[in-house]
Every structure is written in C-alpha cells, then in structure tokens.
C-alpha cells in the first residue's frame, strides 16, 4: 500500500524517532509503544550506537529496542512516519533531506513560522530551507486539522503556543488586547541542566522570563489575528515537573458583543476529543494525558478570563505529534491517546 495513502487500520505503521534522548523523544516512545497500530523500528541518537535503550534509560529496560545512529534517509526509507526530536536549526537540514520521502512530524521550531524574517529574529539563526515553508502544515489539530490532512510534513506547535492559541483562537480578529501568563514545569526547559532549572533553586521558586520576547509569541499572534503589540506574553517557571497552567485576560474590540463571543468560545471545542471544558481548571487533572482543560468566563468590565492546562510533554509536544500522525495516516485521531488517562494524584 502507498505510504502516502489512507491506512485505515490495514497495516501496522512503521515509525522512527530521530533524536530519541530528549524528553520529547522519550515521551514519543512511551506513547507509541502503547499505540495499537504502531511499531517503533528506529530510535536514533548521535551519542549512542547499537545500545539497548534500557542501558541508557533504565525505566525503559522492558523494551526490546536499540538506539542507533542511523542516517535519516535510511530511517525515512524504512518508515511510514518519522518524528524529529531535534533542536531548532539542527532539524532544518534533516527535514529538507526527508521531506516528500515519508510522512514527517517535526517537533522543532524550524518550520512553525511561515515568515522567515520573524523566524530569524526570534531564533537568531538563518533559515536555510525557507522554500519548504509553504509545503509544511502547522500541526495544531483543533485549529488547522484540514491543513494537516493535505500535507505530508507537519510542524508541531510550541507548548506555550499551543495552550495560548486554544485560549485566544475563539476570539480571532475580535481581540483589542490580551495578557497571557503561562506557568510551566521544569521539563519544559529540556534535559540539559542550567542554573535556572537546578532543583534547589526551582523547587521553591517561581519567576518569569523572556517577557514579550518568548519565541512562541508569533504562533499565538497568527491564530488569534493580533500583532505583537496587542499581547503581553509572560512565561513563568513553576516548582513542578510537568504541565503548563495558563491564563489569558482578553479585552475585546469595542464593537464586539462580549457575551456572544463568550458563548461561542464555550461551544467551539465541544466536539474536540481532547478538549474538556471544566468549571475549575487544575494542573493535576491533566498531567500524563493528551487533554487540554479549558474554562472561559466573564470578568469585570466585560473582559474575558480564559484559563487552561496541558501537559507540556504530551499535549504540548509528543501527544500532539501522535495526534497529527493519526490524522496523516487515516487512523482514528484518538488512537493510542484517549487511553492515556491523567496521572492522579
């Protein structure tokens, strides 16, 4: 069967993960290992060659899988879908090499933005494959599902960006100004240790960083129909490992019926399998799952208060990537994900 056709459960997908050793790569492996229609046949890393994954990560000692340093083209040739867990800039060349040769889901930032100047301003590197940008879909299923279906390479959203978009997109082109505050766990900083993520500092602390300079801002602006001048974006680090708790204080344009807009927001995602409307949003209710819990309410002076929570490693990264894979391959969108109930307590 043509790998770009509709699988419809007719065969098990052969999947590869390029860049297995980061938190998102490991989370991808955890989810795909439990997926009923996927076999992970490659897990690659430049630091390891033919090493049982359990030797590097003892919590995965039950898996019969070796980490290899296999070339990306070889992985693409053998796989129906390839996930990239590489850093930005590094991913550019790999995506370019395998685009069109298999289905690709890139978790880096390199192809999220369709404007090269904006990318280079925020990421401080040159984009060497800007010609591919029009051919790659932005992978937030709840907003861009139809675009995802038409492409073979998908750029996964940033974790802050995903939650902020879910909170602001219902009011697209109706927003006068928005203040977004997102508190993220330490896993959002990746595996490499740093002073800011060091446990003795982080475990009792909360602090904001990159205010109005965070790299996820342009993603939010596009889906909300606003400019950078209309948003205050305040990323904040919290004393926990997983999750993002976000709040958006939204001021609508003067001619907008606020109550009607609020009603629309509370209906927009009703049929989305991973969106749950909650009377109270709590981080502990979503950790370990692909759910996004949301609440939209009316504040003082006709402001909208939008709250949400996601697991940054699942819905904010690996879970969304698998959701995109299901869409690309004609599988039930919830396959391998709905069974991931939140870990509680």
Image: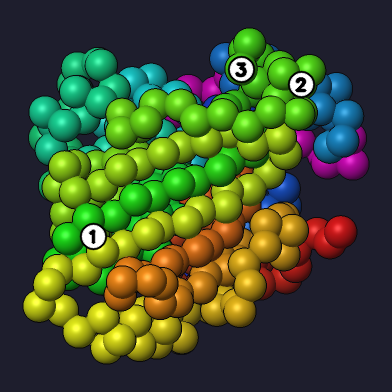
For the residue pair 243 and 57, the one nearer the viewer reads as 243
Magenta span has 312?
no
Q: Taking the image as drawn, is residue 293 in sight?
A: yes
**Residue 174 location, x and y as percent?**
17, 70
Q: Taking the image as drawn, is residue 139 in sight?
A: no
Horizontal side of residue 35 vs 124, given as left or right: right
**Residue 211 location, x and y as percent?**
37, 31
**Chain-order first, disc 1 or disc 2:** 2
Where does the magenta region start and end? 61-72
Give the image quarter of residue 185: top right
Question: Which residue is pictured at 40% across the width and 77% down the height?
Answer: 298
Residue under numbered circle 3:
196
How far apart in space, not on screen, are marks 1 and 2 (Cα)?
35 Å
Residue under numbered circle 2:
199
Q: What element carries label 2?
A: helix
Quadrant housing the N terminus: bottom left
Give the image quarter of residue 319: bottom right
Magenta span has 62?
yes
Residue under numbered circle 1:
224
């Amino acid at each position: 069967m043509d790998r770009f056709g509709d699988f419809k459960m007719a065969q098990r997908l052969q999947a590869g993960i390029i860049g297995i050793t980061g938190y998102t790569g490991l989370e991808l492996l955890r989810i795909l290992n439990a997926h009923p229609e996927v076999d992970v046949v490659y897990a690659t890393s430049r630091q390891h060659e033919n090493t049982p994954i359990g030797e590097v990560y003892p919590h995965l000692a039950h898996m019969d899988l070796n980490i290899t340093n296999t070339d990306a083209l070889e992985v693409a040739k053998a796989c129906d879908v390839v996930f990239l867990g590489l850093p930005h800039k590094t991913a550019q060349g790999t995506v370019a090499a395998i685009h069109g040769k298999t289905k690709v889901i890139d978790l880096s930032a390199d192809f999220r933005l369709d404007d090269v100047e904006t990318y280079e301003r925020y990421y401080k590197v040159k984009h060497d494959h800007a010609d591919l940008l029009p051919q790659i879909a932005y992978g937030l299923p709840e907003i861009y599902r139809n675009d995802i279906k038409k492409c073979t390479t998908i750029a996964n959203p940033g974790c802050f960006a995903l939650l902020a978009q879910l909170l602001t997109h219902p009011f697209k082109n109706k927003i006068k100004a928005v203040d977004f505050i997102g508190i993220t766990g330490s896993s959002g900083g990746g595996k490499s240790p740093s002073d800011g993520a060091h446990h003795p500092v982080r475990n009792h602390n909360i602090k904001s960083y990159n205010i109005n300079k965070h790299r996820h801002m342009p993603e939010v602006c596009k889906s909300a129909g606003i400019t950078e001048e209309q948003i205050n974006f305040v990323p904040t680090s919290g004393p926990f490992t997983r999750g993002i708790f976000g709040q958006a204080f939204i001021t609508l344009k003067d001619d907008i019926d606020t109550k009607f807009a609020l009603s629309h927001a509370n209906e927009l995602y009703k049929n989305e399998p991973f969106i749950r409307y909650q009377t109270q949003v709590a981080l502990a209710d979503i950790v370990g799952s692909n759910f996004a819990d949301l609440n939209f309410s009316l504040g003082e002076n006709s402001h909208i208060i939008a709250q949400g929570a996601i697991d940054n490693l699942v819905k904010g990264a690996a879970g969304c990537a698998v959701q995109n894979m299901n869409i690309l391959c004609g599988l039930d969108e919830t396959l391998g994900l709905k069974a991931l109930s939140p870990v509680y307590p």
